[in-house]
Amino acid sequence: MRTQWYKNAVVYQVYPFSFMDSNNDGWGDIEGIISKLDYIKELGVTAIWFSPLYQSPDYDYGYDISDYKAIDVKFGTMEDFDRLLEECHKRDLKVIMDMVINHTSIEHPWFRKALESPDSPYRDYYIIRKGRREGDQLLPPSNWESSFTGSAWERIGNTDEYYLHLFCPEQADLNWDNPKVRDEIVDILNFWLDKGVDGFRFDVFNMFSKVYPIKDDHSKKSFQKGAPYYVDGPHIHEYLNELYNRSLSLYDTYTVGESFHPSDEDAYAYVKEENHELDTIFNFAHLDADNIAGKKFFWKPFDLKQFKKGLFGPQKTYYRDGWNTLVLENHDNIRSVSRFSIDTGKYRYEAATMLATVTFMGFGIPFIYMGEEIGMTACKFRSIDEMKDPVSHFVYDLLCKYHIPKQLAFRFIRYGARDHARVPMQWNGSVNGGFNRGHEPWQCMNPDYKEINAEKDLNSKKSVYRFYQKLLKIKKTNETAIYGETEEYAHDHRQVIAYTRIYQGKTLLVMGNFSRYKASFRMPDGYEYAEVLLNNYDSLKFSEGKAELKPYQAVVLQK
Ligand code: GLC
């Protein structure tokens, strides 16, 4: 029986590499996570999503899996995982596993066997095609680009064949059109569900289905070459429905799909309840409001209107017959207080709490990325060598290849790098921020850990964590905050974001000032005497029907 427990859930994302290193070897681990479960629980969340814990050679830090049924040794053992699951459930925390099934590691036995012999049945688990001969040159089968730069095809040794990889060359795309692959996936999902996990986050799920036969993409409008042939592909809805029928619907699950630039129409179809595909997907459109055309490394001044459009669009579309998610950060994005043209120096607390309020009070499930709840900031990386993410290096090399001066190339990378989110969690002001006992962490620390850390935040009068506690309590228990319909106000206002949530005669008004200057906002009627449920300042000023908001002030009123 599916209880739809997710509807008032609040999810916390743990990136295991960087959360807590209990054995002081430089890598976070399961034992470390267990030691911090009370900290997570106290925040007020109801579920944890674990970024991959499976065996992996880590070309893409866990997102290249070589054994779906094993825990990677650096994190612990399967017994440790079972204990983690038990400790989460003891605390009433649901467990959501990351499922990376668009591709496997090239070290996965399936891929190894596929390459061993031309007759291997595993060849058809992947997308392997002959290259094209032009004169004496061998070219890839098509002009498709990988999301991580360069061709999406990698040549197999000295043969004239290539395999498809939409991400790193070490991440080979699976052929979902092969029913045997789908059988394997169902088996993997059921393995974890039988253990008792409560749901999955499907990595880049809307790339599972490709258009065959493979052909060049000549469209000028593609986000990246080939995208029309591998995003929202022809069988994706069918495949999701199959997973639902053969696995997900047989347990009390929740699913969230990470989508890659989906069309509006497909996005809606993925989450429409009656379609039996996914419960929710992530929408990241609002996170492109300070970059050029969705390209993370290319800065543009923050566009509040674009942010609003991205944030409210899915709330409107999915309201009647689907559910939504609300996201500010994850392991692929820079820290939210350090973007959106925010003044982090003076107003870090106000900005962090404003961002959380205006985002998480909307319609949908809040997803909080570890460290966001204490207002962690972007890392002050000094050189490209401090960054571990392969993508930072691919893009850096590409920029240098186009003769962009190294210093400038590094500035681009530092602007959008995923590494910012992947530095170790800052627990206290001691060595390595309390992440471990002094062994050099796999990824450098953010040098600001003495100033910004969980212990200091909790002891501060302006504690982001304590504000989150209040916010999440409302979010979980107030029916209007859970079920209310969102109506946006003042879309054209250049500083303020404002909306109501309405449910069974009750209304919440949420307002936030997105700037370092005062801002005035004409409220809908009747809110001057409404109850203040949440405020990140001590007071709130009204004048003639207008709310006079201080820098980064955020307020929730109820009537
Ligand atoms: C998703 C993950 C990202 C990973 C990529 C390839 O976007 O969030 O971290 O690199 O998929 O698996």
Image (cartoon, rainbow, N blue to C red):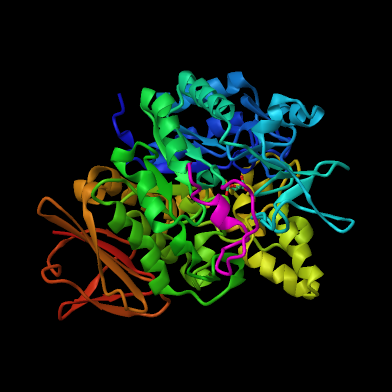
Q: Is residue 441 visible?
A: no
Is 452 above or below relative to 183? below
Question: Which one is in front, 540 or 54?
Answer: 54
Name the quadrant containing residue 312: bottom left
Residue 68, position as x, y percentages in the image: 61, 28
The secondary structure making up most of the magenta span is loop
Question: Which one is in front, 485 or 500?
Answer: 485
Is 427 above or below relative to 397? above
Residue 63 belongs to the span the image colors magenta: no
Is 541 above or below relative to 115? below
* Image quarter in which the C terminus is found: bottom left
Question: Is residue 374 found left or right of 492 in the rendered image?
Answer: right
Please tell me which residue is depicted at 54% across the width and 36% down the height of the picture: 99
* Image quarter in which the N terminus is found: top left
For the image, the number of numbered tags is: 0
Residue 73, position as x, y percentages in the image: 70, 27
Range shown magenta: 211-235
Residue at the extreme front of the image, as rendered: 135
Residue 529, position as x, y percentages in the image: 12, 66
Please tell me which residue is depicted at 48% across the width and 41% down the height of the picture: 235
Q: Is residue 254 visible?
A: yes
Question: Is residue 291 found left or right of 242 in the rendered image?
Answer: right
Residue 313, position as x, y percentages in the image: 34, 61
Residue 224 belongs to the span the image colors magenta: yes
Question: Is residue 44 found left or right of 105 in the rendered image?
Answer: left
